[in-house]
């Protein structure tokens, strides 16, 4: 049962809440917010909303049509674990004040429309998503970009590069490069802070499965959430990132979901488990390859067909393509397989229970906007089902070890964000069905990414270029 306004009043009274915080997501995928005294929270707030300046939000309105509304979703309520005085946080939908319709560029609205489109097809009534977001925790981060200089410096007490540093004393226990997966403390120096993050997540209503150190040296971690429906999981992932960053901060540390902050070690991915259900029954279980149904294989076919366009949304930063390269467990090969982590789509084989049958899409990374990413992958999968797209033969070999003549037959993810945006420009029709994504949203996304990320990086020299070319 969802929360009602009466439930919120009871929550406010029982917890002596003094403030209400309204959170919503900008176009690229960051939470924005404003707060008000709890006395301002009445029923009209949930009917008429609260106004704000949409022209100041990235990728949104022009200054000549800047008035916008946020309308909070009572079911999204949680007691904010970081704000004082005690604050009730609500996730909001963005609404046009003139038409009272949900704003077409609001990411949460797009995710809601994707769920509506799923139901309208009659194929399924629920799509479940389970992301495995990886991130780094660092002890220090410095960076600067000026017309005549550029640098970055990250550091972690765990970093293998600090094995010889004077630490008064240096006690060792620093994970090797690509050797950070699953060691116990003291090699895993971040167990306790991850546990603290998990406790805060649970107190805030998130359903956590487990946590562990990840492959890279120097602070790479993973905390996994239990699967949920599309919009709820996107809401949860936003809260997850909020908690990770703020728990790190209150421990005098810094956390980042940047996909590739370290050279020559593993980057952070976000493998996304997915399944469709109808009338309480799983639809991906069957008698085909790896215990899949024909419908499930068609879903895979749709993801693979549109994968290069999807990466413009699921891997939306220039830095994303520093991770999507061979040699670092990154799934650059657009193929599917059971158990095989070198393929971009894996069919887990841990259990024979039909309720656990799912696919794992391995190329996304945690810099993505989850509302866009989950909606886009669902639309690709549905396109596969509606058009009976054959995913081809599975590849059960280690793709990284294939000879060049075999490898050349397997398509790959784009090599850059610019290339991914080109792919999206040429393959966006599947996203437009049911008016889930609009042409305006796609065009704005492509233009925003090129103007604000691709071009600024393309135009600036890097320190490595001086290393290579200063003496030419």
Image: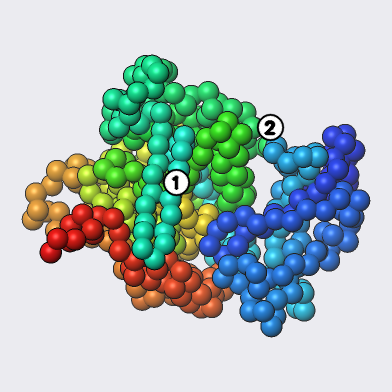
State which quadrant residue 204 falls in: top right
Q: Position of residue 299 (x, y in %)?
A: 40, 57
The answer to whether residue 149 is left or right of residue 69 is left
Q: Position of residue 2 (x, y in %)?
A: 75, 47
| Label whose residue precedes the other's in the sequence (2 or 1) | 1
**From mark 2 to mark 1, how far is it between C-alphas?**
32 Å
User: Could you tell me if the residues under marks 2 and 1 are in contact, i.e. CB atoms within 8 Å?
Assistant: no
Q: Does the rendering let one see residue 10?
A: yes
The answer to which of 76 and 387 lies nearer the viewer is 76
The answer to which of 350 and 273 lies nearer the viewer is 273
Q: Quadrant of the C terminus?
A: bottom left
Q: Position of residue 468 (x, y in %)?
A: 18, 57
Identify the residue position indicated by label 2 in the image: 203
Labels 2, 1: front one = 1
The kind of secondary structure element at disc 1 is strand
**Crowdedness near tag 2: few (<14), some (14–19) or many (≥20) residues, C-alpha within 10 Å:** some
Q: Name the residue: 30% across, 32% down.
A: 161
Identify the residue position indicated by label 1 in the image: 142
User: What sort of colour scheme is used for the picture?
Assistant: rainbow
The answer to whether residue 301 is left or right of residue 1 is left
Q: Name the residue: 64% across, 75% down.
A: 61
């Amino acid at each position: 049962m969802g929360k009602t306004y009466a439930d919120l009043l009871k929550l406010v009274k029982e917890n002596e809440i003094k403030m209400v915080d309204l959170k919503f997501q900008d176009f690229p995928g960051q939470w924005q917010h404003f707060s008000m005294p709890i006395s301002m929270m009445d029923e009209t707030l949930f009917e008429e909303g609260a106004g704000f300046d949409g022209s100041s939000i990235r990728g949104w309105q022009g200054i000549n049509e800047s008035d916008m509304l946020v309308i909070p979703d009572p079911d999204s309520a949680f007691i904010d674990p970081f704000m004082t005085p005690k604050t009730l946080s609500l996730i909001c939908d963005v609404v046009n004040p003139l038409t009272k319709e949900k704003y077409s560029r609001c990411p949460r609205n797009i995710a809601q429309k994707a769920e509506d489109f799923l139901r309208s097809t009659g194929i399924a009534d629920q799509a479940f998503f389970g992301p495995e977001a990886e991130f780094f925790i660092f002890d220090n981060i410095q960076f600067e970009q000026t017309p005549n200089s550029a640098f970055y410096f990250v550091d972690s007490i765990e970093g293998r590069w600090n094995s010889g540093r004077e630490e008064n004393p240096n006690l060792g226990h620093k994970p090797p490069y690509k050797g950070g997966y699953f060691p116990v403390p003291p090699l895993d120096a971040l167990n306790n802070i991850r546990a603290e993050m998990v406790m805060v997540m649970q107190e805030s209503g998130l359903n956590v499965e487990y946590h562990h150190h990840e492959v890279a040296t120097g602070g790479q971690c993973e905390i996994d959430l239990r699967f949920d429906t599309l919009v709820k999981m996107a809401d949860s992932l936003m809260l997850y990132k909020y908690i990770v960053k703020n728990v790190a901060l209150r421990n005098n540390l810094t956390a980042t979901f940047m996909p590739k902050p370290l050279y020559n070690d593993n980057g952070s991915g976000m493998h996304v488990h997915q399944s469709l259900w109808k009338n309480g029954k799983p639809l991906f279980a069957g008698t085909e390859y790896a215990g899949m149904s024909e419908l499930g294989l068609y879903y895979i076919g749709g993801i693979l067909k549109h994968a290069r366009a999807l990466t413009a949304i699921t891997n939306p930063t220039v830095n994303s393509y520093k991770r999507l390269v061979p040699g670092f467990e990154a799934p650059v090969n657009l193929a599917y397989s059971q158990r095989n982590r070198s393929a971009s789509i894996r069919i887990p084989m841990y259990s024979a229970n039909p309720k656990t049958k799912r696919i794992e899409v391995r190329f996304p990374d945690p810099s993505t906007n989850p509302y866009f990413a989950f909606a886009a992958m669902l639309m690709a999968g549905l396109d596969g089902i509606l058009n009976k797209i054959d995913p081809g033969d599975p590849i059960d070999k280690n793709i990284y070890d294939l000879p060049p003549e075999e490898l050349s037959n397997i398509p790959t993810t784009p090599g850059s964000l610019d290339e991914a945006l080109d792919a999206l420009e040429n393959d966006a029709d599947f996203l437009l069905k049911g008016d889930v994504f609009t042409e305006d949203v796609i065009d704005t996304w492509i233009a925003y990414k090129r103007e604000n990320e691709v071009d600024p990086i393309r135009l600036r020299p890097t320190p490595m270029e001086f290393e290579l070319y200063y003496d030419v």
